[in-house]
Image (cartoon, rainbow, N blue to C red):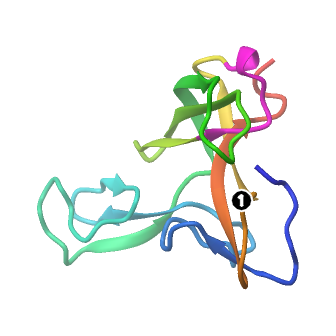
Amino acid sequence: MNETSDPSKKKEPFRKGLFNLEDQDPRLTGIQCERCHISFYPKREFCSNCFQSDRMKEVNLSKIGTLYTYTTVFQGKPNFSAPYSLGFVDLKEGLRIFAPLLDVAPEDLKIGMEMELVFRPMDWVSGQEESWVYGFKPRKGKNS
């Protein structure tokens, strides 16, 4: 993924509603049931625990999590340079987020390591908007 951004283009999430890049501290945007205190990502219309929709509130999710598991892709799709790693990261809200694992060689990944949320522009951008994606990278100084 490209780490630079074109300042002339408007930053937009690759899928609306996943996160907000306009905030000073961008985060993934989830939803929480105020009855059950269960969080969901991506957002949904109703709680799958109590089946109610009247007490759902939007919440910003944690930026720090723990690597639950991962895989490394050695023969990737077009537009992706292999090898690259994908994994599930557990957040304190009880959510397990699937995302690319960035800024780390596959051999340096360890289950249980602390990860931190990052945002990057996609490489294959065209038009007036610049699509951004999220991923996780190892948290500095926490995984030695």
Q: Residue at label 1? A: 122
- Which residue shows up at 69% across the image and 48% down it? 79
Quarter of the image for the C terminus: give it.
top right
Say above or below: 29 vs 69: below
Q: Is residue 5 left or right of residue 47?
A: right
- Which residue shows up at 40% across the image and 56% down it? 41
Q: Secondary structure at mark 1?
A: loop
- Which residue shows up at 59% across the image and 38% down it? 65
Q: Position of residue 29 (x, y in %)?
A: 50, 65
Q: Position of residue 60 (x, y in %)?
A: 53, 64
Q: Which of these two is toward me, 37 or 77?
A: 77
Please, which residue is most extreme toward the front here?
78
Q: Which residues are magenta?
A: 100-109
Say above or below: 50 vs 1: below
Q: Which of these two is toward me, 88 or 139?
A: 88
Say above or below: 144 vs 16: above
Q: Is residue 57 left or right of residue 84?
A: left
Q: Is residue 139 left or right of residue 113?
A: right
Q: Is residue 107 magenta?
A: yes
Say above or below: 12 vs 107: below
